Each structure stands twice: as structure tokens, then as C-alpha cells.
Image: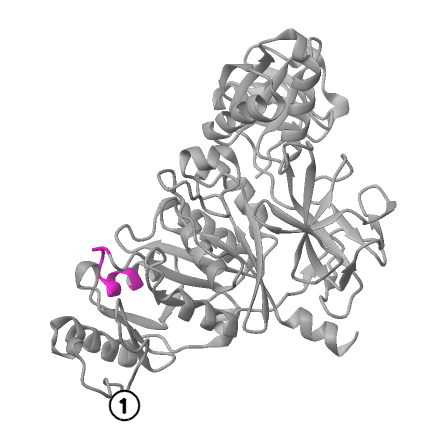
Amino acid sequence: MSTQLKNEIQNRRTFAIISHPDAGKTTLTEKLLLFGGAIRDAGTVKGKKSGKFATSDWMEIEKQRGISVTSSVMQFDYDGHRVNILDTPGHQDFSEDTYRTLMAVDSAVMIIDVAKGIEAQTVKLFKVCKMRGIPIFTFINKMDRQGKEPLELMEELEEVLGIQSYAMNWPIGMGKEFLGIYDRYNKRIEPFRTEGKRFLALDEEGNLAEEHEMTKTSYYTQAMEDIELLNEAGNDFSLDRVKKGELTPVFFGSALGNFGVETFLETYLQFAPSPQARETQENEAIDPIEMPFSGFVFKIQANMNPAHRDRIAFVRIVSGKFERGMNVTLARTGKSFKLSQTTQFLADDRETVTEAVAGDIIGLHDVGNYQIGDTITSGKKFQFENLPQFTPELFVKVTAKNVMKQKHFHKGILQLVQEGAIQYYKTLHLEEVILGAVGQLQFEVFEHRMKNEYNVDVRMEPVGNKIARWIENEEDVKESMSSSRSMLVKDRFDNYVFLFENEFATRWFQDKNPGIRLYSLL
């Protein structure tokens, strides 16, 4: 391994931004891209009036609704680092996409709205990060609006999420009285909305070293008292505990006001981990520097370029170096092929990539070869750990309104199902199409995309909530076991699945058929 390649890998920082909807996740992403020189003008999520939309919200329905429903990948260089940001959907109906994305990162940035504190979706996503043991950096957003007291928010982190925290900086006031942040780590004060110096120096005692209007306010006095309390009774900073995911560094700022974001980015890049080793199903740790090229598919996206009806498989490079035209093996099939059509991203903007290293995200042109979770290698064949797949709870029967559009109908469903947000089932004899999803919004996005990307109007008939269970011993299943309360269908891999009406129907079936071993996904 050359010194140059080792340095390139160690300079990579790959992270996901997680939060509850409307906490400011996409806005923070835009500002980070602005500092990285990747864009000239930051759009905002709700940019309908100005005609500006967030770079990471590239899908038409995202622009219409002002929400993120897909995971975007963005890359930029900053201060000697190559940064890969994965901007994930905040909406809970798309949490499965977010969970898989979190398997492709080395750290996470958690955004909390100062007024709302820790919300339900944040708790769920935090648990996934905790489960993986990845470092979590916290950005408390919207300090230029009125919200909860900072100490109360720090307490919430420890009580609701069960993670200890260390305030890297501290707000001086908030809302209309937000005067700036006291930077504990860099030992300076950064005034908010000032025409003067960007930073004010502190003396040896930690007080402002020069005359300034803010020192005459009660907000400054309160901030200094809070900082004294944090210094005496707060947690000590430990980089080792940060790397283990046991301590979260906390930053205060305003993404929309573009305040505290650059300080956060600079500090994050110092402490966030470079690409980490990843376990295989054979319990081998794949070292990013020592091993030859390997990676895994964590996302498949259809129609990023609607004019070409293309499909892109997003690959996280785990080890070694990718070179365009190299030969790789797909572990699931054992098939070898050349990687020639490859891209890197700024949301929907793409450019051909000739080289990439561990930590980077690349896109492979897909004609149906890949599935989510696939491993590709240039050396020996192995399979990385499986990615999570959720058991759907809502089901609809889907047909094309125009029977002449059957070909487009089936092609559209096949491609959108590959992305993993919806799951495909068919009845045994009539082969009627049933779709399953974790949330209702997934069906709405499916219907919108079928019309706009495949020119097919669909009719969706609710089948209702069902309990889906797969079968370990399929050879013992008989079609006669199917009934109105326990419908037997097949998934897209031709595995048998029972769709039970409710818990009672599930228990009744098990009592009647004790030899059938049922199981669920996550």
C-alpha cells in the first residue's frame, strides 16, 4: 500500500445527517456544500417562491412537498479532507432507506431543533447509530429562534438518548437576543450578526479579552455562569469515548443563518474517524488500507436521469482503491465483470469517476445485476454483513388503469421495487400485484413516480394492515393453508409469505399448523 493511497484514505470523512423532519437537516447540508465550494448559492428546502431548491432534494416530489424522501450523496473537499455527506430522508415512512444509509457511514451528525428538543424520529435513528457504535456529533440548530434552555437540552441528550455529552461551544442568548457562541474548544467568542471581527479572543481566565457591548448584557453573564458549571460539573472531553459512540460533542448554531456551521465543520473534521474496518459474514474484519478493493451496494435509485430511464447502484467503498475499468466479482452470483460506467455525485449532478478510495461513494450503472446488500471485490470473494430490511405493515393491490400500459406498468414496478422502499408480492394463481410498505407516504411517492417517470396511471386498492411472515420450511407449506385471514403470496424472490389479518389470525394459524416455522424481517 503506497503512502499516497494511505493518506487519501485517512483523509476521507463519510457521514450521514440524521434528524426529525424540519429540524434543518437539508439546510445544514446545503451550507456545508457552500463552504466546500461545491455550490455557489445555497437553496433551501422550502424554496418554491424563489425557484431555488435544496441541492440534495433532486426528485420532483421533494421539490413540490418540501421534504426529503430519498438519500442523496454529496462530495466536496475542505481543508485537506474529502468529505462524503449522505443526506437521508427525515420522514419516518422512509426510515428503511435511512437505516441502510447509516450502514454505509463512519459517523453521524445529529441535528436537534432548539425549540422541539429530541423528537421521535431522532430517537429511532440514534438507536441505529448506537447499535453500530459509530461516533455521533450533535448540532443544536435554530438558535436564532426562541427555544429550550441549553442545559435542558444537554440533559435531554443524556436522559432520552442515554449518551453523555460535551458542549464544544455554548450559546450567548437565543432568539432575538442571540448574541453569539462561546467556543470552549477554540477558546474564543464568535459574535452573531456582526460587522466587526469574526472571532473575539479570551483571556487566560476564559473571559472576553477586549471591550464589547455583549459583556454588559444578562445573556453574557448567564452564559459565563453556565460555562463555569460545565467546567466544574460537566463531562470531560474524551476523543476515545467519542470514537466509541459513548460521548457526543455538542455544537450550537443556526444553519439557516449560516452561523456556527463552519466552526462545526472544522472541528468535526478533526475528530471524526477516517474509514473503518467492516465485518464480513465470515467474521473477518476488512481493513480499509491493507485490503484490495471491496465495497457493498447500500442503495439503488431508478431514473436519476428520467430521459435515459437509468438505474444507479450506490456503492460504499470499504477497502482499497477503485479504478475505472477494473475487474470485480459479485459475491452473490460469483459473476465477474468490468466496472466501466461509474459516477460520483452532487445530488443528481454526476460526473464520470476514474479513481476512488475507501470511504468514497460511487455509482455503478445497473442493468439489473445488483441488489441492495451486494458485495463486490477485486480480490478474494466474501460477503459483508447483511443490510437491514423491514417487514412491511401496509399493503395495497395495484393495477394499471390503462390495460395497454401493462409493459410499462411491470417495468416501472420492477425498477422501483429494486430500490427497497416498497416490497413486491403476487398472488399464487392470478398473479395480482400487491405492494407492501412501512408507511403510507411510500405508496404516494410510488404512484407519483409511476405517472411521472413511466407514464402509467395506477389504481391502488387498500388491502389494509397485515402481518407478513416468511416461512423457514417452505417445503411443508400447502396452498390449502391460504385463507381470507392468512393469504399465501410470493415475494419477488419467489419465497412464500403469509399475510395475516391480525395477531389472532397469526396465533390461530400457528396453533393449527405447529410444524410451519414463521419468521419476520426487522
Image position of 263 (left or right of 211): right
Residue at the farthest bottom position: 204
Percent of width and height locating residue 89: 48, 43
**Which residue sits at x=36%, y=67%?**
260
**Which residue sits at x=64%, y=17%?**
488
Report if residue 498 lies within the magenta region.
Answer: no
Q: How is the image coloured?
A: one colour
Say whether residue 441 is visible: yes
Percent of width and height locating residue 140: 34, 60
Q: What residue type is labelled 1?
A: Asp
Query: Dot 1, how many residues are within 10 Å of its Cα: few (below 14), some (14-19), or many (20+)?
Result: few
* SS at circle 1: loop
**Which residue sits at x=40%, y=62%?**
138
Q: Give the range drawn in magenta.
A: 145-154
Q: Is residue 326 above or below residue 506?
A: below
Q: Foreground residue, 464 or 180?
A: 180
Percent of width and height locating residue 257: 32, 58
> In this figure, which residue is indicated by the disc labeled 1?
203
Image position of 1 (left or right of 277): right
